[in-house]
Image (tube, helix red, strand yellow):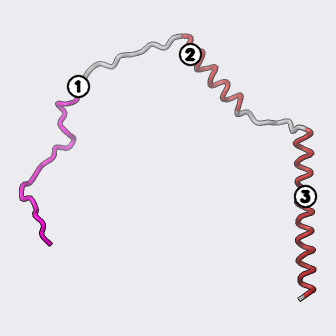
């Protein structure tokens, strides 16, 4: 394997050269009343949209009960099939 290594030691300043950084005062931007109202309105809408649903509708309750009954029927069918197949063997 042929490789050439440099013999020159290079030194890097840590942190990099500070002369590049310019120290300009930051300009402040004033926020208007309309912007503040819009911000508060947006936050209120987000909070309102994420509120928990405390009242369960009749349709949702009926769907939940139907789902539970279907799960019970499916479990009974599986148990019945297991019992029938174990008797055959």
Instruction: Classify residue 17 as left or right of residue 66.
Output: left
Q: Could you tell which of marks 3 and 1 lies nearer the N-terminus?
A: 1
Q: CA distance from mark 1 to mark 2?
A: 32 Å
Check disc 1 and report the residue beneath it. Answer: 22
Q: Mark 1: which secondary structure?
A: loop
- Closer-to-camera residue (30/68): 68
- Residue at 56% x, 16% y is 36
Q: Is residue 45 above or below residue 88?
A: above
Mark 1 crowd level (few <14, some 14–19, many ≥20, 10 Å Cα): few
Check disc 3 and report the residue beneath it. Answer: 70
- Residue 27 lies, in percent from the top left, at 35, 16
- Residue 47 lies, in percent from the top left, at 68, 29
Q: Could you tell which of marks 2 and 3 lies nearer the N-terminus?
A: 2
- Closer-to-camera residue (46/70): 70
User: Which residue is the extreme one toward the left?
Assistant: 7
- Residue at 92% x, 86% y is 88
Q: Is residue 72 above or below residue 42?
A: below
Instruction: Determine the image quadrant of residue 80.
Output: bottom right
- Residue 8 lies, in percent from the top left, at 6, 55
Query: Considering the image in quadrants, where does the C terminus appear?
Result: bottom right
């Amino acid at each position: 394997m042929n490789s050439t290594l440099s013999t020159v030691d290079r030194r890097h300043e840590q942190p990099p050269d500070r002369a590049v950084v310019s120290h300009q005062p930051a300009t402040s931007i004033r926020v208007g009343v309309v912007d503040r109202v819009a911000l508060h309105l947006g936050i209120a809408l987000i909070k309102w949209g994420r509120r928990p649903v405390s009242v369960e509708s009749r349709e949702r309750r009926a769907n939940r009960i139907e789902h539970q009954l279907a799960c019970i029927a499916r479990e009974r069918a599986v148990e019945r099939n297991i019992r029938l197949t174990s008797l055959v063997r």
